[in-house]
C-alpha cells in the first residue's frame, strides 16, 4: 500500500491512470485510453488492462496478476491457479534459435574467384569484338590474319608439338590451328568455330552489362562492326563452301565453353517463361483478395449487426468484386496447370509437378478465403437488423447519460468534500479549497426520497430489473441478448450474496461507529457545556475512536490491540470486495446509476433525517479506521463520509460508489491522505470546528451552534441507542469480534489453500490477537 | 523450450528471408524428415514453396524461375552435391542453410564453386533433430552403440544433434550424466567440448538458474521399452509404428487405398492433439463422441436441399465436413486396428502380467502367470519372449529363478531361435550388473511406504501401474535431491538452486511412456520445463533391434531399417483436379510431403 505513504494530491473519478485527465464516464475513459495511450509504457498498460479486464470479466478467477497489489489483493487467492497445469504450448514466448551467418566469408571467397572469372570472360568478349569489328569478307585473308594476330599473340608453333586437347602429334596432315581468342594451338578436330551472329549476340549483350569493363571508344565500333558483319554473313554463303571460314572465328573448346555459358546467362536474363507471367498475375490477385476480403468482412459484420456505417449496396458490390477476383484466381491457376500439356515433347515431370502444386495451393487459398466471406443480409433482413440495433443504441445511450450524470454528481460531491477539507485547514493544497458555500449547491440537487434507498437494496432492484429484461428479451426472441442479460444477472446475484454477508459485518461495525460519533458530538458540546462534559467523558473514555487530541491522552488503550488487527482485516475485506464490486459496476453501470438518484446521499437536510448523513459519517469513521495509522481526525471523516462511503458497502450508496469503485483505492488514499494533515492540524480540534463542519455539509440545516447534540439526540433513531450509553456497545463489539474471527479463519484457510504462507502467518497472528481481545472483553463485561 | 516450435521457426525464417516468388526446397534425407515433422504440405504451400527436392536426386530439371532454399546437414556428401549444383545452377538464386556447424574450408569451396553468383545467403540454422512433440525430440539413430561403447559416427551425430538442440533453444547448460554408463560420460564430454569450442555461439543471455542437460543411458531402465503401452500415441507406436508422424496401415486387412499410410500430427489434428496422452479406454469413448458429432454434421443424403439457404449452408459446411470426415475415418481406422490387434494378441492379459512383472515383487504368482500365458496360443511368440525378458530382468538374481524352465517353454511354444537369444541379450544389456540403480526394489523408507500404501489401496488401473524410472530421476532432480555420486556434474561447477530448464537425453532412445511422464511433469510442476530426447523413440521392436546390434549378431536384421522419408512422387499427392469448381472442391486433409 504505497499510497498510504503518499500524502500528495488525491483525486477520484474516471481518471486516466496515465495523464490523470478526468473523464466523464467509463466509456469515455476507455476510448480516451485507447486513443491516447495505446503503445505507451507497458507496465502501466498492464495495470489498466488488468483493471479493465477485471471489470469486464467479473471475478474471473483465472486472471493473471499484473500491476499492483492494491488492485489485486482481494483476488490473490485465485491467482495460483493460473500458473497451474503448464502446458508445453503455453511456455514462454520463444525467440528464434541461434543462427550464424557465413555470408560475408562466403562473399569474400567468391569475390576473389569471381573477379578472375569475370575478367576472363570480358577479355574474351573484348577480343571477339575486335575480331568482328572489320569487314571480314572484303578483307584479304593475309590482312585478316594480321589483325587477328594483333588481337592476341599467337603461341609459337614450335612450342606445341602435340594437340593439348587430344594429344595427337601435329604434322603436315594434322595441322596446327590457333585459337583467335586466346592464341593457343589445337588440332582441327578440337577446333571450334564461332559464327558471326553468335559473336554479335554476345558482344551486343555485353555492351550494356559490361560497359564498365569495355573502354568507351570501342563500343560504337562494335555496333557498327556487328551490323556489317551480319550483313556479310548472309551475303557470303559461298565463302563457307571454299573452306575458308572467313565469316567464322576459330577458337579453342575452352573459350567456346565460356562463351556458351555466357550466352546462356544472357538468354535467361531476357526470357521470362509463361508460367512466371501467369504466376505473377495470380499472386497479384491473391494480394488483392487479402486486401479486400477483410474490408468486406468488416462491412458484412457491421451490416449483419444492423449498423448503418456502410451501405448495403456498397458491400454487395465489394462482394461481387471479391468473387470476381476469386474466379480469376481459379482461371489463372487452371491455366498454369495446363501449361505445355499439349506440347511435344511433354514438359519435364518436375514442371508438371510445379504446376500442379501451384494449382493446388490456389485452390486451397480460394477455399479458405472464399468460405470466410459471410453472406450479406437481404434488404428486409437489414431493415429489421437496423431496427434492432436502434433499440440497442437507445438503451446504451441511456446508460451513457446516466453514467455522465453520475460522474458529474460525483465531481460535485468531490468538490464539496474537498471544500470541507479545506475548511478544516487540512487539505489546502487540493484545488485551493472551494468555499464551503459551494457544497450547498452540490448537495441540493441530490435531494430525493431517502426512504426508498434505505429499504430496498439497489442490487435487488437491479436483479428484478434484469429478470424482467430477460423476460422481455425472451419474448422478443433475442437469444444473444438473453444470454448476456443472464450473465449479468448471475453476476449480480453473486454480488448480492457477497454483499449480504458484507453488509452484516458492516452493519454491526457501523452501529459501533455510530456510537463513536455520537460520543464525539457529545464531546464537542462538552467544550461548551462543561458540566455535561464529564458524563460524556466517561462514555468516551471507553472508546477508541475519539480522535480529538484532547482526549487522546486520556483515552484508555485496552481495546487497541484488538482493534488493530481488525482494522487490517477490514481493510483486506474492503479491498477484496471493492475490487470485485468495481467489476460488476462496470458490467451494469446503468442500473446502479439509475438507482442512484434515490440513494442515500440525497437525504434532505431536514433535521429529522439527519440520521442519514450521520450514518455515512459513521461509515467514514469506519473507513478511517481502515487506516493502519489509525490516526484520523474524527472531524474530517464527517466531511469525507458524505462523499466517500466505504466501497465495501455498495448497498447503501451504490450511485456514488459505482463511480468510485473504479478507483476503489482513491477513497482509501483519501482517508489516509487526510490524516497526516489532520494530525498536525488537529492539535486544537476544537469541537466548534466540527460543529461548523456539519452545517456545511447540510446546508439546509443552518449552523445551530447551540444544540447539535440536542438535534442528534431527539431526531436520530440511532442516537437513542448510543444514548443508552457505553454499556450497549460491548455486545456489539463482541459480536463483531466473533465475526472477524470467523472471517480471519476463512482467510487463513484460503491463504493456506493457495500456499501463501507469509499471509497465513500474519493472519494467524491477527486471529490470536482478536481472540485475546475477545477474551479480555468478555472478562470486562462479565 | 518447445522443440517443434523451435524448428518451425527456423523453417519459417528461411522461407520468409527468400522473399516472394515460387520456391523449391532442397533437402537431404535427414532434413526432409526434420522439416516434415513441423510443417505440413498445405501449410508450406501457402508460403509459395511448391517443390521439394532432394539434393542428391539426379533428374532435377533446370527451372530458372524458381528460388532454391537449401536446408542441408553439413556433411561431406551434401557439400559435394552443393558444389556440383552451384557449378551448374538449376535455379535462379540459392539460399543455403546448414543445420549445424559447417567448417570454414567447406564454405570456401562452396564460394569458389559459385561462379555465377547465385548464392544469396549462407547460414547455420540449428534444426538438426527430429522434433516429435513439443517436449520430445529424437535423432532417429538406431544402434548407436557397439557393445558398451559408442559407434564413433553415431557419437558425432548425437553430439551434433544435441548441440543443435541447445542452440535452437538458446540454452548453454550445465551437464550431468549417469556415472554407470561410459557412453553417457563420453557424450557429455563431447557436448562440453563443442560448447567450449563454439563458445561464441553459446553466448546467450544468462538466466538466473542455468539450464541443465542430463544424459542418461537406456541400459539403466531396460524395462520401460518392453512394456505394452495404453496411451494413444504410445500404442500406435508400439503396435503400428510411428515414423516421423506417419503410420503405415498397409498391413491392416481390408484397408482402403487412401488410408494405407496416414499422418498423425498433433500440430494440425485436433483430435490427435487432445487424445494422444489419453489411455485406450478414453480414446474409445472420445472416438465415439467424434463419430456422433460427425453423424450430426453429416448432411443427410436423402434430405433434399429445399431452399437456397439450405444449399448455402450445405456448401459452407461442406469443406469442414469433408475435413472432419477425413479425421474421423483416419482415427476410426487406427483405433479399430489397435483394438483388433489388442484382442488378437491378447494384449490386455499380457499387459497385466507385464505390469505385474515390472511393479510387483511376488515371484511365484508372476512365474505362474508367465507360464500360463506361454501356454496361450493367442500370445504371439514375440510377446511371449517379451514376458520372459521381463521376468529375466526382474528376477535375475532371485533364489528360485526358473528362467531355464521358461526358456524351455518358449522353445516348446515354437518361438524361434532369434527371439530366444534376445532374452539373454536383454539381460546382458540391462541386467543388474549393468544397472547403476535398482529398478525393482525400493531403496529408501519413503519408497517402501509408498509401495506398501499402494498395495493397500489397490491399483486403479492394472495396465498403467508402471512408472518409468525416469519419473523418479526427474522428480529427484527437480527437488534438487538427485545424488551427485550417481549423476555427477561435468566440470567443477554445480547447480545450487533447483533446476528450471531441464533437457534429458537418453542414449539408446526414449519411449512414449517416458514422454508422457515428462508431459505430466511439465503440467504439474510450475516453473519447471523439461524436454526429453533420445537417439530414437522406441517401441519394443526397436529396442530389440538395438540390442541385437549390441550383440553384433550376424543374422539379417528382422526389422527393416528406418525408411527415410522419401519425397512423394507427384502421383501420390492428392491432386487438385483441374476441372473442379472451387466451391465444391473437397476439403483438405492434412497432407505431408
Image (spheres, coloured by chain):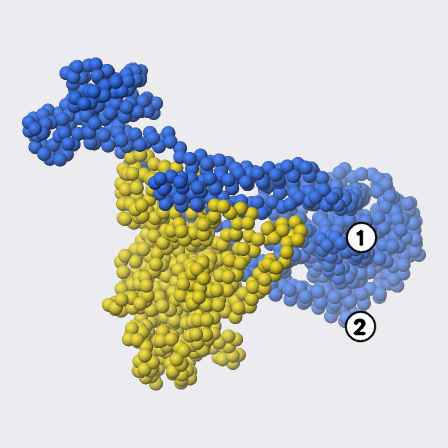
Q: Which mark is residue B542?
A: none
Q: Chain of mark 2?
A: A
The shade of chain B is yellow
Q: Position of residue B171 (x, y in %)?
A: 41, 52
Taking the image as shown, residue B287 lies to the left or right of residue B22, namely: right
Residue position for label 1: A653
B437 shown above or below A79: below
Quadrant assignment, res A214: top left
At x 30% / y 46%, what residue is drawn? B58
The tag earlier along the polypeptide, 1 or 2, is: 1
Report the side of B506 relative to A766 (left or right).
Answer: left
Residue B179 seen in render: no
Circle 2: element type: loop
Residue topped by disc 2: A782
How many numbered discs?
2
Which one of the lettered chains is coloured blue? A
Q: Residue at x 40, y 33 (%)?
A: A272
Secondary element under disc 1, as helix, strand or loop, is: loop
**On screen, B383 above or below B475?**
below
Label 1 neighbour load within 10 Å: few <14, some 14-19, many 20+:
many
Q: Dividing the picture into quarters, in which one does residue B14 lie?
A: top left
On screen, residue B281 above or below B257: below
The x and y percentages for residue A538 are 84, 61
Of residue B194 and residue B338, the one placed in the foreground of this image is: B338
Residue A617 % position (x, y): 82, 53
**Residue occupying the point 84% across, 39% down:** A438
The chain under label 1 reads A
Q: Identify the image quadrant of residue B255.
A: bottom left
Q: Are marks 1 and 2 in contact (CB under 8 Å)?
A: no
Q: Residue at x 48, y 68 (%)?
A: B336
User: Which one is nearer the viewer's eye here, B61 or B83?
Assistant: B61
Amino acid at each position: 500500500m504505497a499510497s498510504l505513504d503518499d500524502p500528495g494530491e488525491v483525486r477520484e473519478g474516471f481518471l486516466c491512470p496515465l495523464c490523470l485527465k478526468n473523464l466523464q464516464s467509463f466509456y469515455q475513459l476507455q476510448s480516451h485510453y485507447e486513443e491516447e495511450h495505446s503503445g505507451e509504457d507497458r507496465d502501466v498498460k498492464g495495470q489498466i488492462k488488468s483493471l479493465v479486464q477485471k471489470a469486464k470479466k467479473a471475478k474471473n478467477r483465472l486472471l493473471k496478476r499484473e500491476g499492483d497489489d492494491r488492485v489485486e489483493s482481494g483476488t490473490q487467492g485465485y491467482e495460483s491457479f493460473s500458473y497451474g497445469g503448464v502446458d508445453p504450448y503455453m511456455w514462454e514466448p520463444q525467440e528464434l534459435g541461434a543462427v550464424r551467418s557465413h555470408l560475408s566469408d562466403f562473399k569474400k571467397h567468391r569475390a576473389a574467384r569471381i573477379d578472375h572469372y569475370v575478367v576472363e570472360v570480358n577479355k574474351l568478349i573484348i577480343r571477339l569484338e575486335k575480331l568482328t569489328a572489320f569487314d571480314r569478307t572484303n578483307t584479304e585473308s593475309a590482312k585478316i590474319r594480321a589483325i587477328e594476330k594483333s588481337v592476341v599473340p599467337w603461341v609459337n608453333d614450335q612450342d606445341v608439338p602435340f594437340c593439348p586437347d587430344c594429344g595427337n602429334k601435329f604434322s603436315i596432315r594434322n595441322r596446327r590451328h590457333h585459337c583467335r581468342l586466346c592464341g593457343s594451338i589445337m588440332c582441327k578436330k578440337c577446333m571450334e568455330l564461332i559464327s558471326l551472329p553468335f559473336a554479335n549476340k554476345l558482344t551486343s549483350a555485353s555492351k550494356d552489362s559490361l560497359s564498365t569493363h569495355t573502354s568507351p571508344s570501342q563500343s560504337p565500333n562494335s555496333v557498327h562492326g556487328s551490323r556489317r558483319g551480319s550483313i556479310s554473313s548472309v551475303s557470303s554463303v559461298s565463302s563457307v563452301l571454299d573452306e575458308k571460314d572467313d565469316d567464322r572465328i576459330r577458337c579453342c573448346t575452352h573459350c567456346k565453353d565460356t562463351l556458351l555459358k555466357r550466352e546462356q546467362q544472357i538468354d535467361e536474363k531476357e526470357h521470362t517463361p509463361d508460367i512466371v507471367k501467369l504466376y505473377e498475375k495470380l499472386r497479384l490477385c491473391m494480394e488483392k483478395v487479402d486486401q479486400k476480403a477483410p474490408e468486406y468482412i468488416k462491412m458484412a459484420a457491421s451490416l449483419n449487426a444492423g449498423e448503418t456505417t456502410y451501405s448495403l449496396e456498397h458491400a454487395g458490390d465489394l462482394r461481387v468484386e471479391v468473387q470476381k477476383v476469386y474466379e480469376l484466381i481459379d482461371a489463372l491457376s487452371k491455366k498454369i496447370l495446363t501449361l505445355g500439356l499439349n506440347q511435344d515433347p511433354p514438359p519435364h515431370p518436375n514442371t508438371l509437378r510445379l504446376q500442379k502444386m501451384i494449382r493446388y495451393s490456389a485452390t486451397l487459398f480460394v477455399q479458405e478465403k472464399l468460405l470466410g466471406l459471410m453472406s450479406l443480409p437481404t434488404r428486409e433482413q437489414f431493415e429489421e437488423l437496423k431496427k434492432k440495433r436502434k433499440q440497442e443504441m437507445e438503451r446504451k445511450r441511456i446508460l451513457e447519460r446516466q453514467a455522465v450524470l453520475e460522474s458529474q454528481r460525483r465531481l460535485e460531491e468531490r468538490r464539496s468534500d474537498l471544500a470541507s477539507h479545506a475548511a478544516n485547514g487540512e487539505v489546502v493544497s487540493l484545488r485551493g479549497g472551494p468555499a464551503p458555500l459551494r457544497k450547498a449547491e452540490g448537495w441540493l440537487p441530490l435531494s430525493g426520497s431517502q426512504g426508498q434507498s434505505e429499504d430496498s437494496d439497489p442490487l435487488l432492484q437491479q436483479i428484478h430489473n434484469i429478470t424482467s429484461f430477460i423476460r422481455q428479451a425472451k419474448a422478443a426472441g433475442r437469444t444473444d441478448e438473453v444470454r448476456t442479460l443472464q450473465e449479468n444477472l448471475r453476476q449480480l446475484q453473486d454480488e448480492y450474496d457477497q454483499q449480504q454477508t458484507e453488509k452484516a459485518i458492516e452493519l454491526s461495525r457501523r452501529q459501533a461507529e455510530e456510537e463513536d460519533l455520537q460520543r464525539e458530538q457529545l464531546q464537542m458540546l462538552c467544550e461548551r457545556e462543561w458540566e455535561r462534559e464529564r458524563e460524556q467523558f466517561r462514555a468516551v473514555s471507553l472508546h477508541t475512536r475519539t480522535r480529538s487530541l484532547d482526549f487522546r491522552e486520556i483515552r484508555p488503550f485496552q481495546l487497541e490491540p484488538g482493534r488493530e488487527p481488525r482494522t487490517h482485516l477490514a481493510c483486506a475485506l474492503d479491498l477484496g470486495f471493492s475490487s470485485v464490486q468495481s467489476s460488476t459496476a462496470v458490467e451494469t453501470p446503468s442500473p446502479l446509476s439509475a438507482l442512484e438518484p434515490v440513494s442515500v446521499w440525497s437525504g434532505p437536510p431536514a433535521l429529522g433525517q439527519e440520521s442519514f448523513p450521520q450514518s455515512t459519517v459513521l461509515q467514514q469513521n469506519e473507513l478511517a479506521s481502515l487506516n493502519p495509522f489509525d490516526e484520523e481526525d474524527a472531524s474530517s471523516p464527517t466531511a469525507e463520509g458524505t462523499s466517500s462511503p466505504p466501497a465495501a458497502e455498495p448497498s447503501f450508496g451504490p450511485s456514488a460508489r459505482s463511480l468510485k469503485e473504479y478507483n476503489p483505492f482513491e477513497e482509501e488514499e483519501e482517508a489516509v491522505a487526510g490524516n497526516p494533515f489532520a494530525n498536525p492540524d488537529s492539535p486544537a480540534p476544537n469541537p466548534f470546528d466540527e460543529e461548523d463542519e456539519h452545517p456545511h455539509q447540510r446546508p439546509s440545516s443552518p449552523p445551530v451552534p447551540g444544540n447539535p447534540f440536542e438535534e442528534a439526540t431527539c431526531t436520530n433513531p440511532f442516537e437513542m441507542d448510543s444514548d443508552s450509553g457505553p454499556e450497549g456497545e460491548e455486545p456489539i463489539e463482541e459480536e463483531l469480534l466473533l465475526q472477524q474471527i470467523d472471517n480471519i479463519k476463512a482467510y487463513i484457510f484460503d491463504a493456506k489453500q493457495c500456499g501463501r504462507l507469509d499471509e497465513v502467518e500474519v493472519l494467524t497472528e491477527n486471529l490470536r490477537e482478536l481472540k485475546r481481545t475477545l477474551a479480555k472483553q468478555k472478562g470486562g463485561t462479565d | 523450450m518447445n522443440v517443434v516450435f523451435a524448428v518451425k521457426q527456423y523453417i519459417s525464417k528461411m522461407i520468409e528471408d527468400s522473399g516472394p516468388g515460387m520456391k523449391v526446397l532442397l533437402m537431404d534425407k535427414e532434413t526432409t524428415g526434420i522439416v516434415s515433422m513441423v510443417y505440413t504440405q498445405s501449410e508450406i504451400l501457402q508460403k509459395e514453396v511448391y517443390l521439394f527436392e532432394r539434393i542428391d536426386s539426379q533428374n532435377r530439371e533446370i527451372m530458372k524461375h524458381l528460388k532454391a532454399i537449401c536446408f542441408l546437414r553439413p556433411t561431406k556428401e551434401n557439400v559435394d552435391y552443393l558444389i556440383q549444383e552451384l557449378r551448374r545452377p538449376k535455379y535462379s538464386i540459392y539460399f543455403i542453410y546448414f543445420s549445424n556447424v559447417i567448417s570454414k574450408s567447406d564454405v570456401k569451396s562452396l564460394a569458389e564453386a559459385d561462379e555465377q553468383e547465385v548464392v544469396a545467403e549462407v547460414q547455420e540454422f540449428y534444426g538438426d533433430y527430429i522434433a516429435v512433440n513439443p517436449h520430445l525430440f529424437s535423432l532417429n539413430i538406431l544402434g548407436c552403440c557397439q557393445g558398451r561403447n559408442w559407434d564413433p559416427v553415431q557419437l558425432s551425430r548425437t553430439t551434433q544433434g544435441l548441440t543443435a538442440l541447445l542452440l535452437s533453444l538458446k540454452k548453454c547448460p550445465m551437464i550431468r550424466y549417469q556415472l554407470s554408463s561410459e557412453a553417457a560420460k563420453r557424450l557429455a564430454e563431447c557436448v562440453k567440448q563443442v560448447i567450449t569450442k563454439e563458445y561464441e555461439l553459446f553466448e546467450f543471455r544468462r538466466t538466473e538458474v542455468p539450464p541443465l542437460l542430463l544424459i542418461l543411458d537406456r541400459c539403466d531402465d531396460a524395462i520401460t521399452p518392453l512394456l505394452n503401452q495404453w496411451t494413444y500415441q504410445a500404442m500406435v507406436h508400439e503396435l503400428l509404428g510411428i515414423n516421423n508422424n506417419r503410420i503405415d496401415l498397409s498391413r491392416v486387412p481390408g484397408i482402403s487405398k487412401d488410408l494405407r499410410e496416414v499422418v498423425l500430427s498433433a500440430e494440425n489434428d485436433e483430435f490427435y492433439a487432445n487424445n494422444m496422452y489419453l489411455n485406450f479406454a478414453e480414446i474409445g469413448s472420445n472416438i465415439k463422441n467424434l463419430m456422433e458429432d460427425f453423424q450430426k454434421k453429416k448432411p443427410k443424403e436423402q434430405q433434399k436441399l429445399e431452399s437456397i439457404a439450405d444449399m448455402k449452408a450445405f456448401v459452407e459446411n461442406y469443406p469442414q465436413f469433408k475435413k472432419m470426415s477425413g479425421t474421423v475415418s483416419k482415427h476410426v481406422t487406427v483405433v479399430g486396428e489397435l483394438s483388433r490387434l489388442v484382442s488378437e494378441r491378447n494384449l490386455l492379459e499380457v499387459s497385466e502380467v507385464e505390469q505385474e512383472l515390472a511393479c510387483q515383487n511376488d515371484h511365484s504368482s508372476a512365474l505362474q502367470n508367465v507360464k500360463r500365458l506361454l501356454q496361450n496360443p493367442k500370445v504371439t511368440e514375440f510377446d511371449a519372449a517379451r514376458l520372459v525378458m521381463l521376468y529375466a530382468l526382474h528376477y535375475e538374481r532371485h533364489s528360485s529363478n526358473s528362467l531355464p524352465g521358461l526358456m524351455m517353454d518358449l522353445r516348446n511354444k515354437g518361438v524361434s531361435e532369434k527371439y530366444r537369444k534376445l532374452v539373454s541379450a536383454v539381460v546382458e544389456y540391462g541386467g543388474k550388473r549393468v544397472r547403476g540403480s535398482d529398478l525393482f526394489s525400493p531403496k529408501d523408507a519413503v519408497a517402501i511406504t509408498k509401495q506398501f500404501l499402494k498395495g493397500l489401496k489397490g491399483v486403479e488401473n492394472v495396465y498403467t501401474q508402471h512408472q518409468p524410472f525416469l519419473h523418479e530421476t526427474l522428480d529427484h532432480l527437480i527437488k534438487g535431491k538427485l545424488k551427485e555420486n550417481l549423476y555427477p556434474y561435468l566440470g567443477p561447477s554445480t547447480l545450487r538452486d533447483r533446476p528450471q530448464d531441464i533437457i534429458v537425453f537418453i542414449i539408446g532412445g526414449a519411449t512414449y511412456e517416458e514422454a508422457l511422464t515428462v508431459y505430466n511433469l511439465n503440467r504439474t510442476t510450475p516453473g519447471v520445463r523439461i524436454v526429453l530426447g533420445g537417439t530414437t523413440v522406441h517401441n519394443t521392436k526397436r529396442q530389440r533391434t538395438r540390442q541385437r546390434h549390441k550383440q553384433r549378431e550376424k543374422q539379417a536384421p528382422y526389422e527393416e531399417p528406418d525408411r527415410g522419408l522419401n519425397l512423394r512422387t507427384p502421383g501420390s499427392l492428392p491432386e487438385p483436379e483441374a476441372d473442379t469448381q472451387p466451391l465444391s472442391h473437397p476439403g483438405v486433409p492434412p497432407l505431408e510431403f
